[in-house]
Image (spheres, grey):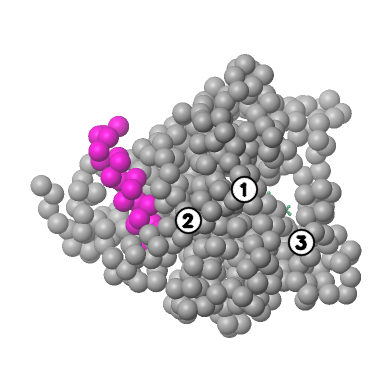
Amino acid sequence: MATPLDTKTSLDSLHRLRDEIVHRNPAQPEFHQAVHEVLETLAPVLAARPEYAEPGLLERLAEPERQIIFRVPWQDDKGRVHVNRGYRVEFNSALGPYKGGLRFHPSVNLGIIKFLGFEQIFKNALTGQGIGGGKGGSDFDPRGRSDAEIMRFCQSFMTELQRHIGEHTDVPAGDIGVGTREIGYLFGQYRRITNRWEGILTGKGQGWGGSLVRPEATGYGNVLFAAAMLRERGEDLEGQTAVVSGSGNVAIYTIEKLAALGANAVTCSDSTGYVVDEKGIDLELLKQIKEVERGRVSDYAERRGASARFMPGGRVWEVPADVALPSATQNELNEDDAATLVRNGVKAVSEGANMPTTPEAVHLLQKAGVAFGPGKAANAGGVAVSALEMAQNASRTAWQAERVESELARIMNDIHTTCHETATRYGAPGDYVAGANIAGFERVADAMLAQGVI
Ligand code: NDP
Ligand code: 2IT
Protein backbone atom coordinates (compact mmCIF):
# COMPACT_ATOMS: atom_id res chain seq x y z
CA MET A 1 0.00 0.00 0.00
CA ALA A 2 1.51 3.34 -1.03
CA THR A 3 1.78 5.98 1.68
CA PRO A 4 -0.02 9.29 0.91
CA LEU A 5 2.31 12.21 0.29
CA ASP A 6 1.60 15.83 1.02
CA THR A 7 1.69 18.31 -1.84
CA LYS A 8 4.97 19.86 -0.61
CA THR A 9 6.76 16.49 -0.56
CA SER A 10 5.40 15.79 -4.05
CA LEU A 11 6.56 19.18 -5.27
CA ASP A 12 10.06 18.64 -3.83
CA SER A 13 10.38 15.27 -5.52
CA LEU A 14 9.13 16.73 -8.81
CA HIS A 15 11.76 19.48 -8.62
CA ARG A 16 14.48 16.88 -7.98
CA LEU A 17 13.26 14.90 -10.95
CA ARG A 18 13.23 17.98 -13.15
CA ASP A 19 16.85 18.78 -12.20
CA GLU A 20 17.84 15.22 -12.99
CA ILE A 21 16.14 15.37 -16.40
CA VAL A 22 17.90 18.65 -17.23
CA HIS A 23 21.22 17.10 -16.20
CA ARG A 24 20.70 13.91 -18.26
CA ASN A 25 19.50 15.77 -21.38
CA PRO A 26 21.93 18.67 -21.78
CA ALA A 27 21.33 21.42 -24.36
CA GLN A 28 17.68 20.55 -24.99
CA PRO A 29 15.92 23.68 -23.68
CA GLU A 30 12.59 23.05 -25.43
CA PHE A 31 12.44 19.52 -24.01
CA HIS A 32 13.22 20.86 -20.52
CA GLN A 33 10.49 23.48 -20.94
CA ALA A 34 7.87 20.91 -22.01
CA VAL A 35 8.75 18.53 -19.15
CA HIS A 36 8.82 21.33 -16.58
CA GLU A 37 5.44 22.59 -17.72
CA VAL A 38 3.88 19.16 -17.14
CA LEU A 39 5.69 18.35 -13.88
CA GLU A 40 4.78 21.65 -12.24
CA THR A 41 1.08 20.74 -12.47
CA LEU A 42 1.33 17.16 -11.16
CA ALA A 43 1.99 17.70 -7.42
CA PRO A 44 -1.69 17.45 -6.40
CA VAL A 45 -2.11 14.19 -8.36
CA LEU A 46 0.97 12.60 -6.78
CA ALA A 47 -0.28 13.72 -3.36
CA ALA A 48 -3.71 12.20 -3.97
CA ARG A 49 -2.55 9.07 -5.82
CA PRO A 50 0.78 7.98 -4.28
CA GLU A 51 0.92 4.86 -6.49
CA TYR A 52 2.00 7.22 -9.28
CA ALA A 53 5.08 8.23 -7.30
CA GLU A 54 6.44 4.72 -6.78
CA PRO A 55 7.69 2.55 -9.63
CA GLY A 56 9.87 5.10 -11.39
CA LEU A 57 6.81 6.03 -13.39
CA LEU A 58 7.72 9.66 -14.05
CA GLU A 59 11.32 8.75 -14.82
CA ARG A 60 10.10 6.24 -17.40
CA LEU A 61 7.60 8.73 -18.84
CA ALA A 62 10.34 11.30 -19.42
CA GLU A 63 12.66 8.81 -21.17
CA PRO A 64 11.73 7.91 -24.77
CA GLU A 65 11.24 4.20 -25.38
CA ARG A 66 13.44 4.51 -28.47
CA GLN A 67 15.30 7.32 -30.28
CA ILE A 68 16.35 6.83 -33.88
CA ILE A 69 18.79 9.20 -35.59
CA PHE A 70 19.88 8.61 -39.16
CA ARG A 71 21.72 10.08 -42.14
CA VAL A 72 19.65 11.42 -45.03
CA PRO A 73 21.81 11.96 -48.12
CA TRP A 74 20.16 13.44 -51.20
CA GLN A 75 21.11 15.14 -54.46
CA ASP A 76 19.92 18.60 -55.49
CA ASP A 77 18.96 19.49 -59.07
CA LYS A 78 22.58 20.34 -59.89
CA GLY A 79 23.80 16.93 -58.72
CA ARG A 80 25.34 18.26 -55.48
CA VAL A 81 25.07 15.91 -52.52
CA HIS A 82 23.60 17.19 -49.25
CA VAL A 83 23.54 15.35 -45.95
CA ASN A 84 20.73 16.01 -43.48
CA ARG A 85 19.87 14.34 -40.22
CA GLY A 86 16.65 12.38 -39.73
CA TYR A 87 14.94 11.66 -36.40
CA ARG A 88 12.14 9.52 -35.06
CA VAL A 89 11.59 9.56 -31.32
CA GLU A 90 9.25 6.75 -30.26
CA PHE A 91 8.33 8.16 -26.90
CA ASN A 92 5.56 6.13 -25.34
CA SER A 93 3.39 3.27 -26.64
CA ALA A 94 1.39 2.41 -23.50
CA LEU A 95 -1.88 3.48 -25.15
CA GLY A 96 -1.24 2.42 -28.75
CA PRO A 97 1.18 2.66 -31.68
CA TYR A 98 3.48 5.70 -31.59
CA LYS A 99 1.65 8.54 -33.36
CA GLY A 100 2.81 12.02 -34.23
CA GLY A 101 4.02 14.20 -37.05
CA LEU A 102 7.24 14.72 -39.00
CA ARG A 103 8.72 18.22 -39.07
CA PHE A 104 11.08 19.40 -41.83
CA HIS A 105 12.64 22.70 -40.74
CA PRO A 106 16.25 23.88 -40.36
CA SER A 107 15.71 24.43 -36.61
CA VAL A 108 15.00 20.72 -36.00
CA ASN A 109 17.31 18.94 -33.55
CA LEU A 110 16.88 16.11 -31.05
CA GLY A 111 15.65 18.43 -28.28
CA ILE A 112 12.91 19.89 -30.49
CA ILE A 113 11.72 16.44 -31.55
CA LYS A 114 11.75 15.25 -27.93
CA PHE A 115 9.68 18.22 -26.75
CA LEU A 116 7.15 17.56 -29.50
CA GLY A 117 7.09 13.81 -28.79
CA PHE A 118 6.64 14.40 -25.05
CA GLU A 119 3.70 16.76 -25.65
CA GLN A 120 2.22 14.25 -28.07
CA ILE A 121 1.94 11.54 -25.37
CA PHE A 122 -0.52 13.61 -23.31
CA LYS A 123 -2.31 15.10 -26.32
CA ASN A 124 -2.96 11.68 -27.81
CA ALA A 125 -4.15 10.36 -24.44
CA LEU A 126 -6.63 13.24 -24.19
CA THR A 127 -8.26 12.27 -27.51
CA GLY A 128 -9.41 9.02 -25.86
CA GLN A 129 -8.19 7.04 -28.88
CA GLY A 130 -5.66 4.21 -28.81
CA ILE A 131 -2.54 6.12 -29.83
CA GLY A 132 0.85 6.48 -28.16
CA GLY A 133 3.22 9.43 -28.57
CA GLY A 134 6.04 9.97 -31.05
CA LYS A 135 7.55 12.62 -33.30
CA GLY A 136 10.15 12.86 -36.02
CA GLY A 137 11.59 15.02 -38.72
CA SER A 138 14.73 16.48 -40.18
CA ASP A 139 16.81 19.65 -40.26
CA PHE A 140 16.15 19.72 -44.02
CA ASP A 141 15.01 23.17 -45.22
CA PRO A 142 12.31 22.80 -47.89
CA ARG A 143 12.32 26.54 -48.62
CA GLY A 144 13.29 27.26 -52.23
CA ARG A 145 13.65 23.58 -53.15
CA SER A 146 12.13 22.28 -56.38
CA ASP A 147 9.46 19.63 -56.40
CA ALA A 148 12.01 17.08 -57.67
CA GLU A 149 14.39 17.94 -54.79
CA ILE A 150 11.59 17.55 -52.25
CA MET A 151 10.75 14.16 -53.76
CA ARG A 152 14.35 12.91 -53.64
CA PHE A 153 14.72 14.07 -50.06
CA CYS A 154 11.47 12.35 -48.99
CA GLN A 155 12.53 9.14 -50.74
CA SER A 156 15.89 9.11 -48.99
CA PHE A 157 14.27 9.89 -45.63
CA MET A 158 11.79 7.02 -46.02
CA THR A 159 14.46 4.59 -47.18
CA GLU A 160 15.64 4.53 -43.57
CA LEU A 161 12.40 5.39 -41.74
CA GLN A 162 10.55 2.40 -43.25
CA ARG A 163 12.58 0.04 -41.05
CA HIS A 164 11.01 1.54 -37.94
CA ILE A 165 7.35 2.27 -38.73
CA GLY A 166 4.28 0.11 -39.30
CA GLU A 167 0.52 0.35 -38.98
CA HIS A 168 0.65 -1.37 -35.56
CA THR A 169 4.01 0.11 -34.54
CA ASP A 170 4.47 3.76 -35.43
CA VAL A 171 2.34 5.93 -37.73
CA PRO A 172 3.85 9.34 -38.63
CA ALA A 173 1.98 12.28 -40.21
CA GLY A 174 2.70 15.91 -41.19
CA ASP A 175 3.85 18.90 -39.16
CA ILE A 176 5.78 22.04 -40.14
CA GLY A 177 7.15 21.63 -43.69
CA VAL A 178 5.35 18.32 -44.23
CA GLY A 179 1.96 18.40 -45.95
CA THR A 180 0.05 16.25 -48.44
CA ARG A 181 2.78 16.55 -51.10
CA GLU A 182 5.52 15.25 -48.80
CA ILE A 183 3.28 12.54 -47.33
CA GLY A 184 2.65 11.39 -50.92
CA TYR A 185 6.36 11.03 -51.74
CA LEU A 186 7.06 9.36 -48.39
CA PHE A 187 4.16 6.94 -48.82
CA GLY A 188 5.19 6.07 -52.39
CA GLN A 189 8.70 5.16 -51.30
CA TYR A 190 7.42 3.02 -48.41
CA ARG A 191 5.15 1.13 -50.77
CA ARG A 192 7.94 0.64 -53.29
CA ILE A 193 10.41 -0.72 -50.75
CA THR A 194 8.01 -2.95 -48.84
CA ASN A 195 5.57 -3.92 -51.60
CA ARG A 196 2.75 -3.35 -49.09
CA TRP A 197 -0.14 -0.88 -49.07
CA GLU A 198 -0.61 -0.12 -45.38
CA GLY A 199 -1.86 2.84 -43.41
CA ILE A 200 1.64 3.68 -42.17
CA LEU A 201 1.21 7.45 -42.58
CA THR A 202 -1.79 9.73 -42.06
CA GLY A 203 -2.57 12.93 -43.89
CA LYS A 204 -2.59 11.01 -47.16
CA GLY A 205 -4.34 12.44 -50.23
CA GLN A 206 -8.04 11.96 -50.61
CA GLY A 207 -8.50 9.19 -53.11
CA TRP A 208 -5.54 7.12 -51.86
CA GLY A 209 -6.40 6.46 -48.26
CA GLY A 210 -6.50 9.95 -46.75
CA SER A 211 -9.40 10.95 -44.52
CA LEU A 212 -11.71 13.77 -45.49
CA VAL A 213 -11.34 16.73 -43.09
CA ARG A 214 -7.78 15.73 -42.00
CA PRO A 215 -6.27 18.87 -43.63
CA GLU A 216 -8.81 21.06 -41.81
CA ALA A 217 -8.85 19.15 -38.52
CA THR A 218 -6.21 20.94 -36.42
CA GLY A 219 -7.43 24.45 -37.19
CA TYR A 220 -11.12 23.53 -36.99
CA GLY A 221 -10.53 21.69 -33.73
CA ASN A 222 -8.70 24.61 -32.16
CA VAL A 223 -11.52 27.01 -32.99
CA LEU A 224 -14.03 24.53 -31.52
CA PHE A 225 -11.91 24.39 -28.36
CA ALA A 226 -11.78 28.21 -28.15
CA ALA A 227 -15.57 28.31 -28.64
CA ALA A 228 -16.04 25.79 -25.82
CA MET A 229 -13.87 27.89 -23.45
CA LEU A 230 -15.91 30.99 -24.32
CA ARG A 231 -19.19 29.09 -23.89
CA GLU A 232 -18.09 28.19 -20.38
CA ARG A 233 -18.03 31.95 -19.69
CA GLY A 234 -21.40 32.59 -21.31
CA GLU A 235 -19.92 33.95 -24.56
CA ASP A 236 -19.42 32.77 -28.13
CA LEU A 237 -17.30 33.58 -31.18
CA GLU A 238 -19.99 35.46 -33.09
CA GLY A 239 -18.77 38.95 -33.96
CA GLN A 240 -15.39 38.52 -32.23
CA THR A 241 -12.14 39.74 -33.76
CA ALA A 242 -9.32 37.21 -33.86
CA VAL A 243 -5.57 37.39 -34.37
CA VAL A 244 -3.98 34.31 -35.92
CA SER A 245 -0.25 33.76 -36.44
CA GLY A 246 1.25 31.55 -39.13
CA SER A 247 -0.06 30.98 -42.64
CA GLY A 248 0.37 27.25 -43.03
CA ASN A 249 -2.00 24.34 -42.63
CA VAL A 250 -3.12 25.11 -39.08
CA ALA A 251 -3.51 28.88 -39.57
CA ILE A 252 -5.50 28.60 -42.81
CA TYR A 253 -8.14 26.24 -41.43
CA THR A 254 -8.29 28.20 -38.18
CA ILE A 255 -9.22 31.27 -40.19
CA GLU A 256 -11.76 29.25 -42.18
CA LYS A 257 -13.54 27.92 -39.07
CA LEU A 258 -13.50 31.32 -37.37
CA ALA A 259 -15.38 32.75 -40.35
CA ALA A 260 -17.85 29.83 -40.27
CA LEU A 261 -18.65 30.63 -36.63
CA GLY A 262 -19.10 34.37 -37.30
CA ALA A 263 -15.72 35.63 -36.07
CA ASN A 264 -13.30 37.72 -38.09
CA ALA A 265 -9.59 36.85 -38.37
CA VAL A 266 -7.66 39.99 -39.21
CA THR A 267 -4.06 38.69 -39.31
CA CYS A 268 -1.77 35.95 -40.58
CA SER A 269 2.03 35.76 -40.60
CA ASP A 270 5.18 33.95 -41.63
CA SER A 271 8.80 34.16 -40.54
CA THR A 272 9.27 37.49 -42.40
CA GLY A 273 6.42 39.43 -40.77
CA TYR A 274 2.66 39.69 -40.63
CA VAL A 275 -0.33 40.96 -42.54
CA VAL A 276 -3.18 42.90 -40.96
CA ASP A 277 -6.34 43.12 -43.03
CA GLU A 278 -9.03 45.44 -41.70
CA LYS A 279 -11.73 43.70 -43.74
CA GLY A 280 -10.71 40.29 -42.47
CA ILE A 281 -8.40 37.80 -44.18
CA ASP A 282 -9.61 36.85 -47.67
CA LEU A 283 -9.28 33.09 -47.39
CA GLU A 284 -9.49 32.30 -51.08
CA LEU A 285 -6.59 34.65 -51.79
CA LEU A 286 -4.56 33.28 -48.88
CA LYS A 287 -5.14 29.68 -49.99
CA GLN A 288 -4.20 30.52 -53.59
CA ILE A 289 -0.93 32.13 -52.45
CA LYS A 290 0.04 29.56 -49.81
CA GLU A 291 -1.40 26.26 -51.05
CA VAL A 292 -1.16 26.71 -54.82
CA GLU A 293 1.72 29.15 -55.40
CA ARG A 294 3.65 28.40 -52.16
CA GLY A 295 4.23 32.15 -51.76
CA ARG A 296 4.63 34.52 -48.78
CA VAL A 297 2.18 36.62 -46.76
CA SER A 298 3.78 39.76 -48.24
CA ASP A 299 2.35 38.62 -51.62
CA TYR A 300 -1.08 38.59 -49.99
CA ALA A 301 -0.74 42.23 -48.90
CA GLU A 302 0.43 43.27 -52.36
CA ARG A 303 -2.54 41.66 -54.09
CA ARG A 304 -5.29 42.37 -51.56
CA GLY A 305 -5.47 46.13 -52.01
CA ALA A 306 -6.07 48.96 -49.56
CA SER A 307 -7.48 46.97 -46.60
CA ALA A 308 -4.26 44.99 -45.99
CA ARG A 309 -0.83 46.01 -44.80
CA PHE A 310 2.36 43.94 -44.50
CA MET A 311 4.36 44.62 -41.31
CA PRO A 312 7.88 43.28 -41.87
CA GLY A 313 9.33 41.70 -38.76
CA GLY A 314 6.27 42.59 -36.65
CA ARG A 315 4.20 40.40 -34.34
CA VAL A 316 0.48 39.81 -34.77
CA TRP A 317 -0.07 40.16 -31.01
CA GLU A 318 0.13 43.95 -31.28
CA VAL A 319 -3.18 43.99 -33.21
CA PRO A 320 -6.15 44.43 -30.80
CA ALA A 321 -8.39 41.34 -30.66
CA ASP A 322 -10.86 39.38 -28.53
CA VAL A 323 -9.29 36.01 -29.27
CA ALA A 324 -5.71 34.99 -30.13
CA LEU A 325 -4.79 31.73 -31.85
CA PRO A 326 -1.02 31.19 -32.16
CA SER A 327 -0.60 28.76 -35.07
CA ALA A 328 3.03 29.02 -36.25
CA THR A 329 5.71 27.63 -33.92
CA GLN A 330 7.06 27.21 -30.38
CA ASN A 331 7.73 30.21 -28.14
CA GLU A 332 6.26 32.73 -30.58
CA LEU A 333 4.16 34.52 -27.90
CA ASN A 334 6.24 35.89 -25.03
CA GLU A 335 5.48 37.77 -21.83
CA ASP A 336 5.51 41.20 -23.52
CA ASP A 337 3.14 39.92 -26.20
CA ALA A 338 0.84 38.51 -23.51
CA ALA A 339 0.85 41.86 -21.69
CA THR A 340 -0.09 43.59 -24.95
CA LEU A 341 -2.93 41.15 -25.57
CA VAL A 342 -4.27 41.67 -22.03
CA ARG A 343 -4.01 45.45 -22.36
CA ASN A 344 -6.08 45.19 -25.55
CA GLY A 345 -8.79 43.16 -23.78
CA VAL A 346 -8.17 39.63 -25.08
CA LYS A 347 -10.65 37.07 -23.67
CA ALA A 348 -9.20 33.78 -24.86
CA VAL A 349 -5.89 32.43 -26.17
CA SER A 350 -5.98 28.97 -27.72
CA GLU A 351 -2.84 27.22 -28.99
CA GLY A 352 -2.98 25.81 -32.53
CA ALA A 353 0.80 25.41 -32.57
CA ASN A 354 2.74 23.25 -30.11
CA MET A 355 4.02 25.24 -27.09
CA PRO A 356 3.78 28.64 -28.84
CA THR A 357 3.29 30.51 -25.55
CA THR A 358 6.27 30.90 -23.22
CA PRO A 359 5.73 29.82 -19.58
CA GLU A 360 5.95 33.46 -18.38
CA ALA A 361 3.29 34.45 -20.92
CA VAL A 362 1.00 31.58 -19.85
CA HIS A 363 1.22 32.65 -16.21
CA LEU A 364 0.53 36.28 -17.09
CA LEU A 365 -2.54 35.38 -19.18
CA GLN A 366 -3.94 33.06 -16.52
CA LYS A 367 -3.36 35.64 -13.79
CA ALA A 368 -5.23 38.21 -15.86
CA GLY A 369 -8.22 35.84 -16.09
CA VAL A 370 -7.84 35.09 -19.81
CA ALA A 371 -9.16 31.65 -20.87
CA PHE A 372 -6.02 29.80 -21.97
CA GLY A 373 -6.21 26.58 -24.04
CA PRO A 374 -2.88 24.68 -24.07
CA GLY A 375 -1.86 23.05 -27.35
CA LYS A 376 -2.00 19.49 -26.08
CA ALA A 377 -5.75 19.95 -25.64
CA ALA A 378 -6.61 22.68 -28.15
CA ASN A 379 -4.74 21.37 -31.20
CA ALA A 380 -5.52 17.67 -30.64
CA GLY A 381 -8.08 17.69 -33.47
CA GLY A 382 -5.39 16.99 -36.07
CA VAL A 383 -4.08 13.83 -34.47
CA ALA A 384 -7.62 12.79 -33.55
CA VAL A 385 -8.66 12.78 -37.21
CA SER A 386 -5.39 11.01 -38.01
CA ALA A 387 -6.57 8.22 -35.71
CA LEU A 388 -9.89 8.22 -37.57
CA GLU A 389 -7.86 7.87 -40.80
CA MET A 390 -6.12 4.83 -39.29
CA ALA A 391 -9.53 3.35 -38.45
CA GLN A 392 -10.76 3.93 -42.00
CA ASN A 393 -7.61 2.36 -43.49
CA ALA A 394 -7.85 -0.66 -41.19
CA SER A 395 -11.44 -1.32 -42.21
CA ARG A 396 -10.84 -0.39 -45.88
CA THR A 397 -13.60 2.21 -45.84
CA ALA A 398 -13.86 5.96 -46.44
CA TRP A 399 -16.21 8.00 -44.30
CA GLN A 400 -18.27 10.96 -45.48
CA ALA A 401 -17.05 14.42 -44.46
CA GLU A 402 -20.07 14.94 -42.18
CA ARG A 403 -19.21 11.84 -40.16
CA VAL A 404 -15.58 12.89 -39.68
CA GLU A 405 -16.56 16.44 -38.78
CA SER A 406 -19.12 15.37 -36.23
CA GLU A 407 -16.60 12.96 -34.65
CA LEU A 408 -14.07 15.80 -34.52
CA ALA A 409 -16.59 18.09 -32.81
CA ARG A 410 -17.48 15.38 -30.30
CA ILE A 411 -13.81 14.70 -29.50
CA MET A 412 -12.97 18.40 -29.05
CA ASN A 413 -15.97 18.88 -26.74
CA ASP A 414 -14.98 15.78 -24.75
CA ILE A 415 -11.42 17.07 -24.39
CA HIS A 416 -12.71 20.43 -23.21
CA THR A 417 -15.03 18.81 -20.66
CA THR A 418 -12.32 16.44 -19.43
CA CYS A 419 -9.80 19.27 -18.95
CA HIS A 420 -12.36 21.49 -17.26
CA GLU A 421 -13.62 18.80 -14.87
CA THR A 422 -10.14 17.53 -14.05
CA ALA A 423 -8.91 21.03 -13.19
CA THR A 424 -11.91 21.53 -10.91
CA ARG A 425 -11.42 18.13 -9.26
CA TYR A 426 -7.82 19.02 -8.39
CA GLY A 427 -8.63 22.47 -7.01
CA ALA A 428 -7.65 24.58 -10.04
CA PRO A 429 -11.00 25.52 -11.68
CA GLY A 430 -10.60 27.18 -15.08
CA ASP A 431 -6.93 26.12 -15.37
CA TYR A 432 -6.90 24.18 -18.64
CA VAL A 433 -3.12 23.68 -18.42
CA ALA A 434 -3.46 21.74 -15.17
CA GLY A 435 -6.58 19.97 -16.45
CA ALA A 436 -4.93 18.82 -19.70
CA ASN A 437 -1.69 17.72 -18.07
CA ILE A 438 -3.35 15.82 -15.24
CA ALA A 439 -6.05 14.14 -17.36
CA GLY A 440 -3.54 13.10 -20.04
CA PHE A 441 -1.09 11.92 -17.39
CA GLU A 442 -3.67 9.83 -15.53
CA ARG A 443 -4.60 7.89 -18.68
CA VAL A 444 -1.00 7.13 -19.65
CA ALA A 445 0.09 6.48 -16.07
CA ASP A 446 -2.73 3.99 -15.42
CA ALA A 447 -1.83 2.06 -18.59
CA MET A 448 1.89 2.06 -17.66
CA LEU A 449 1.17 0.83 -14.13
CA ALA A 450 -1.05 -1.97 -15.45
CA GLN A 451 1.65 -3.06 -17.93
CA GLY A 452 4.47 -3.34 -15.41
CA VAL A 453 8.01 -2.00 -15.30
CA ILE A 454 9.05 -2.07 -18.95
P1 NDP B 1 3.15 24.65 -41.92
O1 NDP B 1 4.49 24.25 -42.38
O2 NDP B 1 1.97 24.39 -42.78
O3 NDP B 1 3.13 26.20 -41.55
C1 NDP B 1 4.01 26.72 -40.61
C2 NDP B 1 3.78 28.20 -40.48
O4 NDP B 1 4.48 28.68 -39.34
C3 NDP B 1 4.32 29.00 -41.66
O5 NDP B 1 3.53 30.15 -41.83
C4 NDP B 1 5.73 29.33 -41.20
O6 NDP B 1 6.29 30.49 -41.82
C5 NDP B 1 5.51 29.59 -39.73
N1 NDP B 1 6.76 29.29 -39.01
C6 NDP B 1 7.36 28.07 -38.90
N2 NDP B 1 8.49 28.17 -38.19
C7 NDP B 1 8.60 29.46 -37.86
C8 NDP B 1 9.56 30.19 -37.14
N3 NDP B 1 10.64 29.60 -36.60
N4 NDP B 1 9.34 31.52 -36.99
C9 NDP B 1 8.24 32.13 -37.53
N5 NDP B 1 7.31 31.48 -38.21
C10 NDP B 1 7.48 30.18 -38.40
O7 NDP B 1 2.95 23.95 -40.49
P2 NDP B 1 1.61 23.65 -39.68
O8 NDP B 1 0.61 24.71 -39.94
O9 NDP B 1 1.24 22.24 -39.92
O10 NDP B 1 2.12 23.73 -38.17
C11 NDP B 1 2.05 24.94 -37.40
C12 NDP B 1 2.13 24.60 -35.93
O11 NDP B 1 1.03 23.74 -35.57
C13 NDP B 1 3.37 23.84 -35.47
O12 NDP B 1 3.69 24.23 -34.15
C14 NDP B 1 2.91 22.38 -35.46
O13 NDP B 1 3.69 21.59 -34.59
C15 NDP B 1 1.50 22.56 -34.94
N6 NDP B 1 0.55 21.48 -35.20
C16 NDP B 1 0.33 21.03 -36.47
C17 NDP B 1 -0.59 20.04 -36.70
C18 NDP B 1 -0.95 19.58 -38.06
O14 NDP B 1 -1.87 18.77 -38.19
N7 NDP B 1 -0.30 20.05 -39.12
C19 NDP B 1 -1.30 19.39 -35.57
C20 NDP B 1 -1.05 20.00 -34.29
C21 NDP B 1 -0.14 20.99 -34.13
P3 NDP B 1 7.55 30.30 -42.82
O15 NDP B 1 6.95 29.67 -44.04
O16 NDP B 1 8.07 31.68 -43.06
O17 NDP B 1 8.53 29.42 -42.11
O1 2IT C 1 1.41 17.99 -33.47
C1 2IT C 1 0.57 17.20 -33.94
O2 2IT C 1 -0.35 16.74 -33.26
C2 2IT C 1 0.69 16.85 -35.37
N1 2IT C 1 1.57 17.37 -36.04
C3 2IT C 1 -0.25 15.86 -35.99
C4 2IT C 1 0.13 14.46 -35.65
C5 2IT C 1 -0.64 13.38 -36.38
O3 2IT C 1 -0.24 12.23 -36.22
O4 2IT C 1 -1.62 13.67 -37.07
The magenta segment is 433-454
Identify the residue shown where x is 86% and y is 67%.
304
Question: Quadrant of the rendered structure where residue 145 is?
Answer: top right
- Label 1 crowd bin: few (<14), some (14–19), many (20+), radius 10 Å: few
**3 or 1: tag closer to the N-terminus:** 3
Q: Nearer the viewer, residue 204 or 358?
A: 204
The type of residue carrying mark 2 is: Arg
Is residue 160 placed above or below 173 in the rendered structure?
above
Residue placed furthest toward the left: 1
Is residue 401 placed above or below 427 in the rendered structure?
above
- Which residue is identified by label 3? 283
Identify the residue shown where x is 64% and y is 52%.
216
- Which residue is identified by label 1? 401
Give the numbered dot on residue 11: none
The type of residue carrying mark 1 is: Ala
Is residue 438 placed above or below 304 in the rendered structure?
above
Q: What main secondary structure does the magenta stretch of the protein show?
A: helix
Q: Nearer the viewer, mark 2 or mark 3?
A: 2
Q: CA distance from mark 2 to mark 3?
A: 26 Å
Q: Nearer the viewer, mark 3 or mark 1?
A: 1
